[in-house]
Image (cartoon, helix red, strand yellow):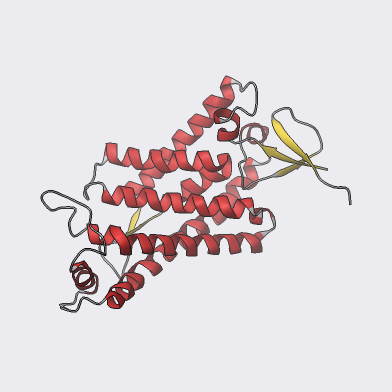
Amino acid sequence: MKEVRFLGLGKGLFFMKRKVRRIDEIVTRFATLGMLSALGFVLMAFAKFPYPFAPWLEIELSEIVTIIAYALYGLPGGIIVAVLKTVLKLLAVGTSSNYLGEVTALLASLMFIIGLAVTSHLKLFKKGLGHRVISYSAIAVFVAVMMTLLNAIVITPSYLTIFANPPHLSTCFDKDVLMKVYNKLMGANSTVNDPWLYIGAVSIIYLPFNLMKAAACFLLYEILFNRLIFVFMRKSAFFKKYFVGDIFTKKEEEDNPDVVVKEEPQK
């Protein structure tokens, strides 16, 4: 029995691991990434739900398509969709936050991709549902922690100054920013510039928010794509020819010139 890994877009097109890639493969791959990016834009722009504990935050589920793009085409596919859906949102809807909201959304997508790259490299996605749940949980915690740190250091402070004249970024190291952000987040009127109060307020708001968003995206991905759509796709000859990135592998008896084959040791 041989383990077959289909070459992703980056491995086949960007790094030229294969000498020739047929035009129909290139068109199919870019068309798929384009459709995923368009779906991501729709989810990003219109499928948003208010976060009950912080009304200025909204949970949007466009990371589902980022995960699917990574599953189908690996790291390059995930990055392309993450960038394109953000650009499409800017072109079609514009920005209401001087691009800070869109940059934040792109950073969140990249955190998902980094987490997927690490866990797929460890082959956790190929060891059953239990290991997938561990992977999803680890990625969710990673995304939540990283986005909370980014919000604490620069993103949330910058919302105080991004609409100033001239607009500029701010950080938690700027004078009096800790007190101002704490009062904004907690609806308080404190005059204490205490870093621990600031860290606590940011953590209380953003850690549960990002955990909830990541959990919702992975749950929908697992139920709708991994457990439903992918089950039908992998039975298709078209799917076997064009898809399967770093998360998925298949077993095949026959050699295929379009794939990289790795012999498994005999047991």
Q: Is residue 227 visible?
A: no
Q: How many marks?
A: 0
Q: Is residue 109 above or below residue 198?
A: above
Q: Nearer the viewer, residue 224 or 139?
A: 139
Where is residue 173 shown, x and y percent of the image? 25, 64
Judge left or right: residue 109 versus residue 69: left
Picture residue at 56% right of the left edge, 42% below the top: 74
Picture residue at 45% right of the left edge, 53% below the top: 111
Where is residue 85 shown, x and y percent of the image? 38, 41
Picture residue at 82% right of the left edge, 37% below the top: 253
Q: Is residue 115 visible?
A: yes
Judge left or right: residue 96 versus residue 203: left
The residue sitting at the right extreme is: 267
Where is residue 51 shown, x and y percent of the image? 32, 65
Picture residue at 54% right of the left edge, 44% below the top: 70
Judge left or right: residue 184 versus residue 117: left
The residue sitting at the left extreme is: 165
Q: Is residue 199 above or below residue 126?
A: below
Identify the image quadrant of the N terminus.
Answer: top right
